Image (spheres, rainbow, N blue to C red):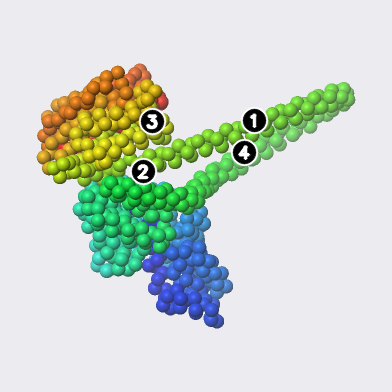
Amino acid sequence: MTRPFKQFSLLVVLLFAFTCQLFANKDSLLRELKKSHSDKDLYTLNFELGWEYAFSNPDSAYYYAKRGLLISKRMNDPSVFAQIYNLLGVSCQLGKNYKDAISFYRESLANAQKTNNTKAILTAYGNIGALYTEIDDQAKALEYAFLSLNLAKQTNDSLKIANNSNNISLIYSNKKELDKALGYGLASLKIYTALNDENGLCNNYGNLGNIYLGLNQLDKAKESYENCHQIALKVNLTFEIAKSANELGALHKIRKEFEKSLAYYQTAEKYAKDSEDQEVLKDTYSGLYQLFYEKNDFKNAKLYMGKYFEAFEEYNKSAHAAEVSKNELAYEFKSKSEQDSIKNAEKEKVTKAQLVANKAQIEKDRLLKIGLTVLSILLVLFGYFMYNRFKLIKNQNSIIEQKNKETEIQKNEIENKNKEILDSINYAKRIQQGLLENKRQLNGCFPENFIYFNPKDIVSGDFYWTTLTKNSKDEDIFYLACCDSTGHGVPGAFMSLLNMALFSESINEKNLAEPNVVFNHIRARLIELIGADGQQDGFDGTLIAFNLSSKKITYASANNGGVLVKGNHSIDELQYDKMPVGRGIIEKGFSLFELDYQKGDTLYLFTDGYADQFGGPSGKKFKYKKLLETILTANDLTLTKQAAFFDETFESWRGKLEQIDDVQVIGVRL
């Protein structure tokens, strides 16, 4: 639910608004443009039209900004160069043309510095920072954002201070430094409130909602999104209406408030369609698919799954063009640095070569006189020999050149095939990630948790799955599964998708309540579907059921349990049945176990990939005993830091050795 960087505040929208505004709106501007005007009025009309179109049609904004630039040069008025170059930069940035955007912003900065226009300088700094954020250079983004903020403080410009503080909050949020992000976000909220700036408040509340969501403060996140949504409706900010409606739809879905959730998602769909925003639309359809799936309305779930993939394809087209522009800009920065280094090195090299050449020329002239006599005698004989040799080499080169061409063609064909395969697998990864249940339900039931998910290949056979449903007594039951499907990579991913579907069938459709009964049903279905020829495909794993009313936890485990770390740092290992969920040597009924725990205990579920990894000084397995020691050490940390700790420990142990299996560790504070 991270907000896209298209919402990064563009200070110029507010900085230059007061310089013109001679006409009421877009229609009146266009009417005035058809009349005869002085260059000054023509410049003003084109400049204002550029801003009118900037956020709805960047191409049109660029057209009017370009006309404004030509008129300003004809006027030869340096005082407007900074603002028109700035408008050109904004239109290019909003149109995802980052390479031209940075050029125009730098022109704006240079002209602002020439005329000592402090407000234009701080605006250029702010927008250059925004651009660095979009190409994922967070260090540069912060540098320019703070430059802009300091100038805003020097000029005591409250609105610019608020805008820059909001931008800095966004950067820290992107860097996952949420405490810093919250500090700057609340600071900008205070100023926007004092100024009664509804556009700023709307943007700020949306970003605060994301920060609170990242901090698992769901009530504050909901309050912030609702404030954002109400203001967006009031001032007709289409993107914020759709985005905040999506966030509120997701939050109400977690709480099983399906009617409220549906209403918000339908609002998001309407406004996303009107603005043709495929990124927001695909998120809306994903939410509607999950909503109808949880309501067991599979007809509508299928409908919105199809719409999701259509919107996803459309979004990919535009996202690809933006990514190309980002890569071009990053390459240009790198290339310029390398060219400067090469140029200096070549200059020094030429100077040294000239000194050596001067000394060598004197010696060369002396030897040449001696050698000419000998050479003239040998030339005729050698010339005949070389002619024959040349013919032979020419024939050989022709053969080699033909072979090289054939090899190059074959190489290109292989590379293209490999790229097609890799693209297909990456696409499969996105589908698999879309089908994996997100963490919202887990956060709602167990606010303190982490999931360390590290596939061996692009797609994974390990998976986790959650759902929240009601039992026959109308009590809320939360289910959490941590499983390892047969195989890894593409075959493992296919098995994980099948296994997730069978979990949903068992609990959401068949209303099977007890974890051991669920395992028995899935095993029967796996044997029925893919085990007819004796195949032993299935999964190992654990399914826990947490009764939210009685707080009772029951579970079933196949070939792999988990551990419970008590408050006194003792470890209880979970019981499990020594057989897989699938065809195996033993096919008796699975056992139902009850977890004896106290509030504050921590439950860890994991697959075998972590313990089986080779590494360390001797290239040996990590082993189960060392995994238990690692869990005890991690338990002293907060849950939010444990995923990073497990990752660092795993990568340090693995070193340069290949990862041998998918890895998954889940921790929840009970």
Task: Tell me which amino acid carries mark 1.
Answer: Thr
Residue type at mark 4: give it: Lys
Find the distance from the CA under tag 3 to the CA under tag 2.
Answer: 16 Å
Q: Let me know if residue 9 appears in the view.
A: no
- Contact, mark 1 vs mark 2 (Cβ under 8 Å): no
Work out how far the residue at label 1 is from the one at label 2, CA to CA, in angstroms: 41 Å
Which residue position holds label 1? 407
Q: Quadrant of residue 159?
A: bottom left
Disc 4 is placed on an element classified as helix
The residue lying toward the viewer, choosing from 134 and 224, is 224
- Tell me the residue at 31%/21% (across/down): 584
In front: 624, or 184?
624
Amino acid on which disc 2 is placed = Gly
Q: Which of pointers 1 and 2 lies earlier in the amino acid sequence?
A: 1
The quadrant of the rendering that contains the C terminus is top left
Q: What whole-number distance in Å separates the C-alpha atoms at marks 1 and 4?
A: 37 Å
From the top left corner, tell me how far across and down residue 556 is, in percent: 21, 29
Crowd band around label 3 with a 10 angstrom C-alpha radius: few (<14), some (14–19), many (20+) = many
